[in-house]
Image (cartoon, grey):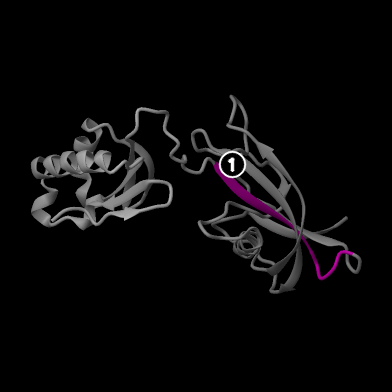
Amino acid sequence: MTFKERYDIFGGVTVSSSDLEVDERRADVFSSIISESLNNWRKGNVQGVWIRIEIKDSHIIPVLVEKGFEFHHTQPNYLVMTKWLPDTPSTLPRWEYLRVRPYSHWSWWTRDRFGKSCSVDEGKTCYLGWKFPGGTSDPGESIFDTAAREVFEETGVRAAGKAILCFRYCSFPQPKQVNVSQYENVGDIYFMCLMDFIGGEIKACPKETADCKWFTR
């Protein structure tokens, strides 16, 4: 048995360690399989090779490194390695290198009626005072969904996104910078969102905030 090859429109092929039988995942056997596959792909003018390695098959990673594969990205249960086959600079797309962090500024009902907004006191980290609730997006989450989730988690109040007021971009962190991405070589976008109050009683979450209050402008 060999890999289940999945070709794309850019001349690439994607395979997975899960395609192989158990005995084919032994390092010595796998080394022969990947060598033969690379020869066949070169003959077929394949440009780039993507291979997904499940965490249970991590013992084959050294074999792939020896064959010239590079790390592309990782997730908790697998990682992906790539190899560019032509004798030209690689045009394989890089992994995402930007982090989105929606922070929420939201009003009680509508701003023109009550003019109140909610702030939280984290009581920790680099914030020594009041700030708007907010946090980092989860994978696949929209900006307003993130803002609504963070507002609820930190204050117990339900709110819906109305508008993005502004945003700022911060490049890779420099020495002594705070409130930027803690990940290496990852930029940061900070969104300020206007949210409409839906319901709920304001109450600080002990795990998230030390206090939260409504403030007038």
Q: Quadrant of residue 21?
A: bottom left
Q: Residue at 27% across / 31% down in the picture?
A: 68
Q: Quadrant of residue 133?
A: bottom right
* Residue 100 inside the magenta-drawn segment: yes
Q: Residue at 68% across / 39% down in the picture?
A: 169
Quarter of the image for the C terminus: give it. Answer: bottom right
> Is residue 155 shown left or right of residue 90?
right
Q: Position of residue 56 (x, y in %)?
A: 21, 52
Q: Residues within 10 Å of mark 1 (few under 14, many from 20)?
A: few
Q: Position of residue 103 (x, y in %)?
A: 68, 52
Of all residues, the one furthest to the bottom in this rendering is: 199
Residue type (three-letter) at the residue carrying disc 1: Thr
Between residue 20 and residue 194, name the one nearer to us.
Answer: 20
Q: Residue at 62% across / 63% down in the picture?
A: 145
> Label 1's element?
loop
Quarter of the image for the N terminus: give it. Answer: bottom left
> Is residue 198 shown left or right of residue 70?
right
Q: Which residue is mark 1?
A: 125
Which segment did they paint magenta? 98-111
